[in-house]
Amino acid sequence: MKKIFDSWDFKKQFKITRDELIVKLKEDMIDTRPAFPQISQYPMWPTAISPIAKHIGDNAINLPSGHNLQEEQIEYICNSIKTHLGV
């Protein structure tokens, strides 16, 4: 499980956090948001210990998507992400 966590941990891989990346992308006119937290964190669901689901909720980003995105828009989004992550 550690290997999965390391591959999705902004703090360990980049000099920018997920939330900082979201702000930078917003400055580039790219609408994003954090991924939803694990469902068992909501009060109406039973509490469950699910470290992978929690980790994804704490680190993942929802990016623009849709059937109507043009190739140029996708390239712009990808290039912006690469620039801000320094890759």
Image: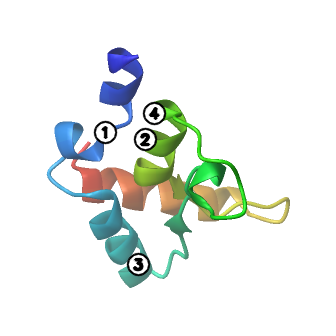
Which residue corresponds to the image point at 58% horizontal and 49% vertical from the top-left? 38
User: How far apart in space, not on screen, are marks 4 and 3 (Cα)?
Assistant: 32 Å
Instruction: Give the residue at mark 3.
Output: 28
Q: Nearer the viewer, residue 76 or 22?
A: 22
Dot 1 amino acid type:
Asp
- Above/below status of 9 relative to 77: above
The amino acid type, in three-letter code, at marker 2 is His
Give the CA separation, mark 2 to mark 1. Answer: 8 Å
Q: Earlier in the sequence, mark 3 or mark 2?
A: 3
Give residue 8's position: percent from left, percent from top: 38, 35
- The C terminus appears in which quarter of the rendering? top left
Query: What residue sits right under mark 4 in the picture?
Result: 51
- Label 2 close to label 1 by CB (< 8 Å): yes
Does the residue at mark 4 contact the one at mark 2 (Cβ under 8 Å)? yes
Q: Mark 4 or mark 3, which is nearer to you?
A: 4
Left or right: 80 with respect to 73? left
Residue that sits furthest to the left in the current view: 15
Q: In the picture provided, is 85 more to the left or to the right than 27? A: left
Query: What amino acid is at disc 3?
Result: Asp
Task: Assess disc 1: are there few (<14), some (14-19) or many (≥20) residues with their C-alpha within 10 Å of its C-alpha.
Answer: some
Question: What amino acid does circle 4 point to?
Answer: Pro
- Left or right: 58 in relation to 65: left
